[in-house]
Image (cartoon, rainbow, N blue to C red):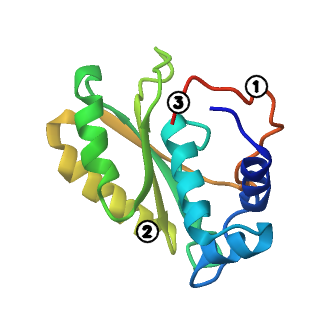
Amino acid sequence: MILDAIDRALIAATQEGLPFRPRPYAAIAERIGIPETEVRRRLGRMLECGIIRRIGAVPNHYRLGYRANGMSVWDVADEETDRLGREIGALPFVSHCYRRPRHPPDWPYNLFAMVHGRDRAEVESKVAEIARLLGEAARGYEILYSLRILKKTGLRTRFAGEKTSCSA
């Protein structure tokens, strides 16, 4: 797949996020001068080809009243990480869940799950729920609290290496 001028304009129009409107794709379409269906088709093609990894909401938890952010880190059997990660990731209060390498002996944790709460007590209650779900599969865990807010950004590209192996 080769990115054309319209693809580049579409990427540039969505770099900072989608417009906060009832029909964000229509707003983007109007801005770059193509039909809304074409915006959707092109974004879908870029998702299929891996040029775009995902389209999703990135909430500002602090603005929503969530002041405590705890990354729960878990020591689970490596062969169970994928299955357990899917179960934890499906919980409504887990914003993201992923596997990371261990660094023994100081860092035995291989499964990470981000939990947001209005305060630390709420985060700890939610993490206790994860612990109940994992049961004996959890050999240990910790909660790492955020100390400061990092700026979240959307897609960034310089259009280098525009050609991909995707033929969509």
**Residue neighbourhood size for the residue with mark 2, other residues' Cα within 10 Å, grouped as few (<14), some (14–19), many (≥20):** few
- Of badges 3 and 1, the one in the foreground is 3
Q: What's the amino acid at mark 3? A: Ser
- Reading the chain from its start, which is encountered first: label 3 or label 2? 2
Q: Residue at x 47, y 28 (%)?
A: 100
Question: CA gap, disc 1 to disc 2?
Answer: 47 Å
The amino acid beneath tag 2 is Ala
Q: Secondary structure at mark 1?
A: loop
The label on residue 161 is: 1
Closest to the observer: 159 or 122?
159
Q: Which residue is labeled 2 in the image?
A: 121
Viewer-proximal residue, 96 or 136? 96
Towards the viewer: 13 or 71:
13
The residue lying at 45 percent from left, 50 percent from top is 96
Q: Nearer the viewer, mark 3 or mark 2?
A: 3
Q: In the rendered image, which residue does mark 3 sit on?
A: 167
Say which element carries label 3.
loop
Query: Between marks 3 and 2, how big is the CA–CA gap?
Result: 50 Å
Q: Residue at x 70, y 67 (%)?
A: 34
Q: Secondary structure at mark 2?
A: helix
> Are dots 3 and 2 in contact, CB under 8 Å?
no
